[in-house]
Amino acid sequence: MLKVRFPIATRSVAFFAVPALAFLSLTMPLSAQVNDAAANADRLQYLDIFEMEVAADPRISPDGSRVVYVRRGFDIMTDGRRTALWMIDSEGTQHRAITDGTSSVSSPRWSPEGNRLLYVSSEDGSAQVFVRWMDSGQTAELTNVTESPGNITWSPDGKWVAMTMFVPEAAPSFAKMPSKPDGAQWTTPPIVINKLRFRADGRGYLEDGYTHIFVMPAEGGTPRQLTSGSFNHGSSLSWSPDSRSIVFSANRDDPDFDVRNSEVFEISVASGELTQLTDRFGPDGNAALSPDGSMIAYTGFDDEYQGYQIAHLYVMNRDGSGSHMVSDLDRNFGGLNWADDGQGLYFQYDDEGMSKVAYVSLDGRVEDLAEDLGGVGLGRPYGGGSYTVAPGGRFAFTHTSPSHPADVAVGQRGREAQRITMLNKDLLGHKDLAQVEELWWESSHDGRA
């Protein structure tokens, strides 16, 4: 049955990389802009945007007892974003900050033993990887790189860290120009473009170069580049159980012309030897190795040049053989995480205006575990969001609704999920918010609701 679900009669607030006041002036109705703040204290006001906070990227500890997450808000003095790492017990107690909020932080990642935490911070002016020892609270800067690290991932033995970073390359030119005299002011040289994808929304012209995979010791040091070539390798990274290889996806065939034709690869950490595991025309990605290393789960489809196609879930043997679709669920699979026993996977998907956390067994049975998975958006369908799952099956996710921005919630199979933070209760608890109503109607195409 086709169901369309839209929230109405809600004041919509979202967090984007734009100045807070500029955004608020666009989202609040004109009548609200001229109301007297004191006379409407029970309504949302301009400056309330600086009091709102959202939870993002919740990371549950390996033993399932604690959750670290990124707490986001806006700084009223700079009209800019502020972030900090916070930690809370899975029962909703011991809620405390673990960074001071003076620098941008992101990507918290627990070590396999749960005694260390990696994260990316700009406390020294540029994005670097830091580690925190959870027993002592001591921190150390592990990298000194010029490009921002992404997709940081612990090896299962806790000895290595994999990441992706952009590697610049020399810009193309028509000819080698002579050096200009000291103090000379020459015309800006022309931009030479030799790629089909040369600019992007919100970024403008793209810098010449490609994203590659790196590894470094968990104690810090110089990251060593594993991948090479004129291809981007910016996907998620999945380590083998023996910490000797990494599985990822990339488009290494003809990315300029076949932009969605990515494949799954495995690369040796020691030698850099690359093995292609899938071979079909379509976007294979989100690769994840099973706990015993015998199988790889991934998403994809055979590209038929349609405007929209479902990314189904597939499982194959470690060597790429025996690939088969696990479930015929008519929804896109994302956020794959193997269950500890290797008999199924956790995933997230969008359904009828709502994002969900679910579990699918290897024989294709789907079980919904939590609803209202959401990100930094408020009052709109499919707000994004993320979740993580501990080896024991307890998971943490960002929970939202049209009445509150994203909080942290915790769940487990067979138990009802519980929201364990209420970051905006002090603000929204005293506000008269509009109520939300679902509207359903029949399709003019086939009469289905």
Image (tube, grey):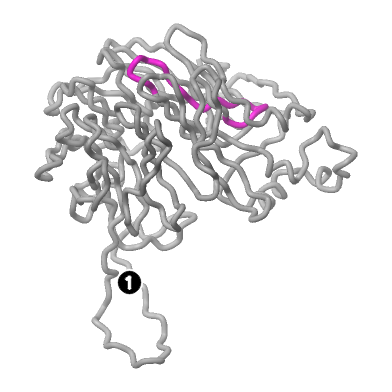
Image quarter for residue 359?
top left
Residue 187 at what x, y percent from top left? Answer: 41, 85
Residue 443 at what x, y percent from top left? Answer: 58, 22
Image quarter for residue 427?
top right
Left or right? Give the position of 280 relative to 286.
left
State yes or no: residue 395 in magenta.
Answer: yes
Q: Is residue 242 above or below residue 144?
A: above
Q: What kind of residue is marked 1?
A: Val
State yes or no: residue 85 in magenta.
Answer: no
Q: Which residue is mark 1?
A: 192
Query: Who is closer to the viewer here, 339 or 307?
Result: 339
- The mark tally for this picture is 1
Looking at this view, name the residue that lies furthest to the right: 39
> On the rendered image, what quadrant is the C terminus found in?
top right
Give the magenta-colored segment's residue range. Answer: 389-406
Residue 284 at what x, y percent from top left? Answer: 27, 34
Residue at (48% x, 21% y) in the render: 356
Crowding around mark 1 (Cα neighbors within 10 Å: few <14, some 14 to 19, many 20+) is: few
Q: Is residue 280 above or below residue 372?
A: below
Query: Who is closer to the viewer here, 207 or 413?
Result: 413
Residue at (28% x, 55% y) in the render: 210
